[in-house]
Image (cartoon, rainbow, N blue to C red):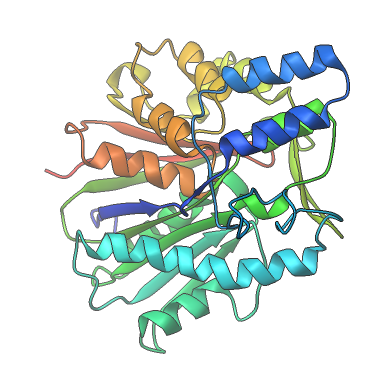
Amino acid sequence: MSERRAYINALAGVVPEHDVHRLFIDWAEGQVADERMRKLFLRMADRSGIEHRWSVLPSTPEGGSQISVGGFYHGAPPPTSRRMQVYAEEAPKLALGAIARLREQIELAGITHLVVASCTGFVAPGVDQVVARRLGLAPSVERLLVGFMGCYAAVAALRSARHIVRSEPGARVLVVCVELCSLHLQDTGEIEKLLAMLQFGDGAGAALVTSDATGFELEAPFATTLPDSDRLIRWDITDKGFEMHLSGEVPQRIAQGLADPEFAAAALGGRDVEAIDGWAVHAGGRSILDAVETAYHLPQGALWASRETLHDYGNMSSATLMFALGKMLKGPRIGQGIALAFGPGLAAEGFGFRSAA
């Protein structure tokens, strides 16, 4: 069992067609009454490292934004029930889009297991069942739905695939992360909440994990948690959607945690920083990437895949890490890589990986 290995053979990602980043900034600027705070918001938006974020919510027939007359968010905030109706319709579509992109790279016949991660909606039958049915997968395909773990759910999904393949070497595991963060816009003038919403967009990533020795070998996973940090990142389910609480303290607390040698070592699964030549860090925000880069004294450009993902798509919750790994899979060979993500808890979870021999 200890010698059995699992590999990410291929990765693909997809986003919706509606770019909402600048539209959001224009709207949010008008939400802030105090001029000084408004200027601060705009400075922070300019420094975010994000250029585009995408949404499943369409423009109005006149080409206006979701907040314009006729848009999803115009007038009274839509209730959670309406947001979940859109999730039930759009999440499977986006997931299937990512799978279609994956199929362009690799044969997907013979899938034995399906692992789906998502934290931005609820529907039953679940997204896993909807996707399995629309793909025409056999009823015998084993499914796992990873729900509400947030940004590090990709780690949970991929490590579950690794465990499956190591226990069943013939398994072919399809892994999908799909998030519709734009369904949870909140009507607020609080700058911390606006800056939190500024980070998030919609996206889906898909991967095939098997025992075939191609792509990235998945190595041992790891997990740790910062003490007294459980209130820093959380979702509250309200009558008006899921309200994200992302404290402005998060980057500082991560930096402080990584300054502790014991936590820093645990957040890499005990690996030697000097030996790591590939960093796939969840792009939770520019300041979080800066904190990791500073804590581990990484050379400029070490987090290139994460920063490119953040720039082009924002934070897509669990799907984000899949995009960064996908970029790296197309890049130079990795002798020792680390995938690392932070999320509710405040937890740090990840795994090692390396290019197949």
What is the x, y in percent for residue 175? 40, 62
Q: Is residue 132 above or below residue 139?
A: above
Q: Residue at x 64, y 48 (%)?
A: 65
Q: Residue at x 54, y 51 (%)?
A: 153
Choose top left, top right, bottom left or bottom right for residue 331. top left
Instruction: Residue at the far left: name it.
Output: 357
Q: Residue at x 48, y 24 (%)?
A: 265
Tag count: 0
- Do we see residue 289 in this rendering? yes
Front-lying residue, 20 or 119: 20
Q: Quadrant of the C terminus?
A: top left
335 vs 183, left or right, is left
What is the x, y in percent for residue 146? 56, 62
Q: Quadrant of the N terminus?
A: bottom left
Q: Residue at x 48, y 49 (%)?
A: 319
What is the x, y in percent for residue 284? 56, 33
Instruction: Residue at the far front: name it.
Output: 62
